Image (cartoon, helix red, strand yellow):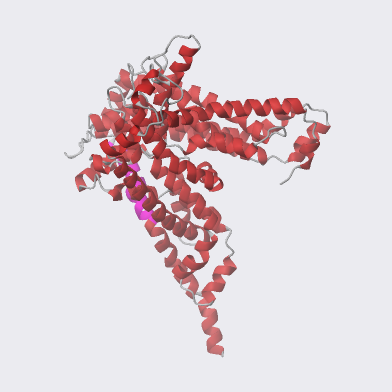
């Protein structure tokens, strides 16, 4: 009897804890080994390679900041940076304003067919970026595209959306907003649903108009979610690659050249892997800086 | 979650209908490109260049061309194999790891978790360059395994799994241990069934990430037979005047299965994509 108790307490005290000591490492091993091989290792290696002249097969040679000075001296890199920032600013503004407006509609009392509207606007999110780009080829194409057909029907001149440096980036912006709108609307809608109704009710009883309730009660309470949406879409914007690569290959006249297209060309067309690694780290630093700003801001905002 | 006070709010009938009408008009505008792609897929070459809205004759020639002249079915198969394998493997990796993070105490836990979370904000293409060099040297380009493994180790997936696993009552696990269940058995027959909602969410997240990925297979796959759907469809665009009808047929065929799955599993899709689509 006493031995059994001793064994039981012994097992309770040591057995499971010992077993647990090893078990979690075993459970984490498949994830972590893969994660190290395909994410963590390459992320660190990329930084190291960015200080070398690595071209794939020959051993890399350390060249200090050579790649970085070459990068900042290349006017094409500045074009890519300027395009990416312009695109990002337009995309983030248009996207978040319209998504917020749509979310307010979804949250309102007057809208009918709410679920159908939500599902309908979310549908483009499920279409892959490349397929979406190909679909929009049929919208923007000169002559046969829907937009040109409509423009002709209205008696407006044709625009070569993808072939004219003034319009190509806007074609990309329209496509990206189209595809992301439902996604951000759903995020903002979830945020709105989280705002307690009695707060809004109290404002209403105090004589606020629906617009005033939205402006002075709902939107301030939604600020953390809006911050999240803006930061997230900014990071996405900086990583723009798929659509301009499929639609315009960065052209015409480099008007849709983005940082990631520049990186792709350096790495996989000219096979200057060390140089491309430096490009990727400049972009990584930009994104990490934004993520840190988000952390600082949201740390203060979230109650 | 009913909110009765909203119904009491004065909702002017006419304004409500006008507002609804406006939103529905916008929705129609958003759905137009999809509809246009479907219509164009069924148009003959002549109809497309005539610029008509409706096909004069509903034609299947674009689909015939697509299947006969391109490797479309092979790309579809590649994408399916890779996405399903990534999802299955990823669910196993993330649920095991998420459960370990949630319900065990061990040295290094905080650091490991912090590293995984921090990696989420590093852009994915940072990894492409060294991996391309390494995998080329190892002769692993052009293999399925290269398209599967990176998606199975989804940092957001393990994070979400941990969130759900934290809610599992520890007493339940201890009861199982006292009954003599081994740790893996406990995971398999107690933890995994309780993680079902998370499996749906993370499953969609991983599947879509793999299905949609472009730059990764674009870099890693070298022969036409090994391309995935997005890379293959993009090559159809070519450099000269594209075969618009065939491109639209390819787009429609590629999107329809996902759209149907989305309409059936709206909740998992919206949850999976909004909770974890940071990458």
| Position in image of residue B201 (x %, y %) | 51, 50
Q: Does the segment drawn in magenta span residue A172? A: no
Q: Quadrant of residue A28?
A: bottom left
Occupied quadrant, residue A227: top right
Q: Position of residue B278 (x, y in %)?
A: 47, 40
* Residue A147 position (above or below residue B101): above
- Label count reads 0
**Residue reaching furthest to the bottom:** A1
Of A165 and B240, nearer the camera is: B240
Q: Residue at x 54, y 36 (%)?
A: A122
Residue A188, x across and y down, in percent: 60, 35
Q: Residue furthest left?
A: A58
Q: The N terminus of chain A lies in which quarter of the figure?
A: bottom right
Q: Is residue B200 left or right of residue B246?
A: right
Quick one: quadrant of the C terminus of chain A?
Answer: top right
Residue at x 37%, y 50% (from the top left corner):
A35
Residue B135 visible from this viewpoint: yes
Say if B56 sits above or below B98 in the image: above
Q: Quadrant of residue A102?
A: top right
Residue depicted at 30% across the width and 20% down the height: A73
Q: Left or right: A113 with respect to A9?
A: right
Q: Position of residue A67 (x, y in %)?
A: 27, 29
Picture layout, residue A209 above or below residue A252: below
Give whichever of B219, A126 is nearer the camera: A126
Q: Residue B122, can we see it?
A: no
Judge left or right: residue B62 versus residue B189.
left
Q: Is residue B6 left or right of residue B257?
A: right
Q: Magenta residues, as a range? A: A31-49
Magenta highlight: main SS: helix
Q: Residue furthest front?
A: B57
């Amino acid at each position: 009897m006493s031995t059994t108790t001793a064994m039981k307490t012994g097992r309770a005290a040591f057995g499971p804890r010992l077993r647990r000591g090893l078990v979690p490492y075993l459970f984490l091993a498949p994830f972590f080994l893969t994660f190290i091989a395909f994410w963590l290792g390459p992320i660190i290696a990329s930084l190291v390679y960015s200080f070398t002249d690595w071209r794939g097969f020959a051993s890399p040679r350390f060249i200090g900041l050579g790649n970085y000075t070459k990068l900042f001296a290349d006017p094409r890199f500045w074009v890519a940076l300027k395009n990416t920032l312009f695109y990002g600013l337009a995309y983030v503004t248009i996207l978040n304003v319209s998504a917020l407006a749509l979310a307010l509609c979804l949250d309102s009392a007057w809208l009918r067919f709410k679920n159908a509207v939500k599902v309908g606007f979310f549908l483009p999110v499920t279409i892959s970026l490349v397929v979406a780009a190909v679909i929009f080829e049929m919208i923007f194409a000169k002559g046969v595209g829907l937009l040109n057909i409509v423009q002709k029907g209205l008696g407006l001149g044709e625009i070569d959306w993808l072939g004219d440096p003034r319009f190509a980036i806007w074609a990309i912006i329209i496509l990206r907003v189209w595809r992301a709108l439902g996604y951000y609307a759903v995020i903002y809608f979830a945020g709105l649903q989280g705002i307690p109704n009695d707060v809004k009710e109290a404002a209403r009883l105090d004589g606020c108009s629906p617009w005033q309730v939205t402006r002075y009660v709902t939107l301030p309470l939604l600020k953390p979610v809006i911050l999240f949406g803006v930061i997230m879409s900014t990071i996405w914007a900086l990583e723009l690659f798929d659509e301009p690569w499929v639609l315009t290959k960065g052209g015409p006249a480099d008007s849709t050249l983005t940082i990631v297209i520049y990186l792709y060309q350096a790495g996989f067309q000219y096979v200057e892997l060390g140089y491309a690694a430096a490009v990727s780290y400049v972009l990584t630093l930009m994104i990490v800086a934004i993520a840190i700003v988000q952390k600082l801001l949201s740390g203060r905002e979230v109650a | 979650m009913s909110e009765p006070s909203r119904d009491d709010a004065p909702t002017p009938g006419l304004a409500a209908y006008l507002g609804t009408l406006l939103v529905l008009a916008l929705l129609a505008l958003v759905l137009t490109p999809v509809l246009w792609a479907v219509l164009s897929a069924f148009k003959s070459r002549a109809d497309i260049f005539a610029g008509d809205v409706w096909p004069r004759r509903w034609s299947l020639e674009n689909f015939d061309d697509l299947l006969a002249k391109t490797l479309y079915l092979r790309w579809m198969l590649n994408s399916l194999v890779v996405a399903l394998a990534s999802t299955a493997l990823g669910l196993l990796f993330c649920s095991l790891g998420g459960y370990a993070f949630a319900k065990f105490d061990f040295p290094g836990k905080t650091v490991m978790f912090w590293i995984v979370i921090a990696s989420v904000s590093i852009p994915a293409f940072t990894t492409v360059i060294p991996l391309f060099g390494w995998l080329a040297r190892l002769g692993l380009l052009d293999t399925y395994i290269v398209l599967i493994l990176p998606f199975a180790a989804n940092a957001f997936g393990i994070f979400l799994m941990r969130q759900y696993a934290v809610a599992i009552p520890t007493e339940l696990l201890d009861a199982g241990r006292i009954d003599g269940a081994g740790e893996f058995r406990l995971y398999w027959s107690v933890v995994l069934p309780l993680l079902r909602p998370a499996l749906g969410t993370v499953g969609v997240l991983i599947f879509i990430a793999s299905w949609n990925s472009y730059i990764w297979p674009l870099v890693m796959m070298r022969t036409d037979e090994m391309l995935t759907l997005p890379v293959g469809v993009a090559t159809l665009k070519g450099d000269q005047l594209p075969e618009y009808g065939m491109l639209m047929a390819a787009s429609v065929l590629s999107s329809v299965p996902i759209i149907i799955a989305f309409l059936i599993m709206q909740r998992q899709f919206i949850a999976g994509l909004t909770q974890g689509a940071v990458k």
